Amino acid sequence: MRVAVDSWRQDLFGDLLRSIRLPSSAWIRLEVRAPWGFSIADENTVFHVVTHGNCWLEMRRLATPVRLFTGDLGFLARGDRYALKDAPGTRPVDFFDFVERHPPDKKRVLRAGGDGAITKLVCGGMRFENRATDPLLAVLPTLIHVAARDADSAPRLRLTVEHVIEELDSDRPGCESVITRLAEILFIEAVRVYLDKNMDTAESGWLAALRDQQVGQALALLHAQPHDPWTVASLADRVALSRSAFATKFAQLVGEPPLRYLTRLRLNAAGERLRSGDAKLRAIAAAVGYESVAAFVKAFKRYLGVTPGEYRRARQPGRLTLTSRELETTPRSHEQR
């Protein structure tokens, strides 16, 4: 059952989901027999769908391992080192080393393990074009676990996964593009499930911030008008709190100070303009809320590690995309006004 939320929260959720930019994805299918285990270090967003059997997912950010059953989906929004295995006590091997020695077949099926119970998974990796600035990726939890028993969401997710498998088997022209779009749909659906299930129960983090009358309204203001000349004081005034009380409350609930969150929104909007058009830097800077090109360039480079011009050129046809500093998700600290 979908949780009813205020219209401004719905608008905010919609804004976050529209921020997703997924230019590419990578897929592999696992058919593994116990005992088996893989250790995986991946900075991108990854997910695993169990299509047969069950497995354990272990991650240092999780207090306890999570068991995934047939039909379950596990999404790691920000990536990290984690392990998939048949049982908690199994010693894992490095996944990428194993793939190098034992590549998957033409249908991207990788087989491994012993002679015990079989588990099958569909696994995907997603590289977001705006990963460093996307506000949605910044506020999602370590793991989104969608269980098959969730009657509202499981059928839609299952149909999407079945479509992915069909495309992987077909090798038809354009299948890579179709699969990437399906990965985007799968991610959006998983996020919607997470938002619906946790909106009224989250005790900390971004969803708890939305339930707070003052901080929630401040977030709505920032998303609706990121180009406005906001200060901590002006935001505090709009939500009827003192500056210090608002700043403390916002940072505690959201996980970062108000103006750092605002910077993320502005640079995400700037990145979209740089990727999708040829507008001058002065016009982009003004459109996203910077008073000068110099201030915009300084903020952009501090956050993404490259200048706006370098960022744009790297996304032109025939150019290699940036892969190092852009993958950083934690911006360097800077003072609030």
Image (tube, grey):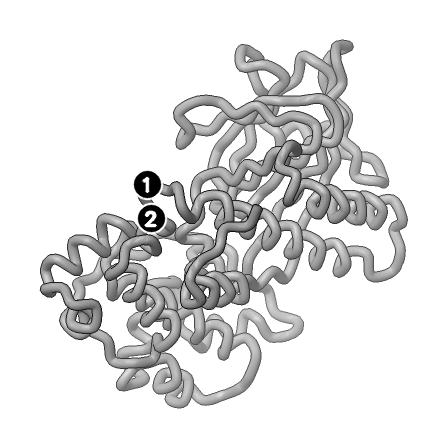
Note whether 257 is above or below 337 in the view shown: above
Give the camera-side residue of 64 and 41. Answer: 64
Q: Quadrant of residue 104?
A: top right
Pointer 1: what residue? 203
Relative image position of residue 277 (x, y in whole percent):
55, 83
* Quarter of the view holding residue 218: bottom left
**Local crowd size for mark 1, using a 10 Å CA cut-off: few (<14), some (14–19), many (≥20):** few
Residue 276 image-quadrant placement? bottom right
The amino acid type found where label 1 is placed reads Glu
288 vs 235, left or right, is right
Quadrant of the snapshot with the C terminus? bottom left
Left/right placement of residue 117 relative to residue 301 reads: right
Instruction: Using the image as rendered, state which of residue 127 and residue 245 is in the foreground.
Output: 245
Q: Are marks 2 and 1 in contact (CB under 8 Å)?
A: yes
The residue under label 2 is 208
Q: What residue appears at the point 66 percent right and 71 percent down from the top-left corner?
A: 318
- State the residue at coordinates (41%, 53%): 138
Name the amino acid, label 2: Ala
Crowding at label 2, few (<14), some or many (≥20) Cα neighbours within 10 Å?
Answer: some
Query: Residue at the spot x=71%, y=37% of the render?
Result: 122
* Label of residue 287 in the image: none
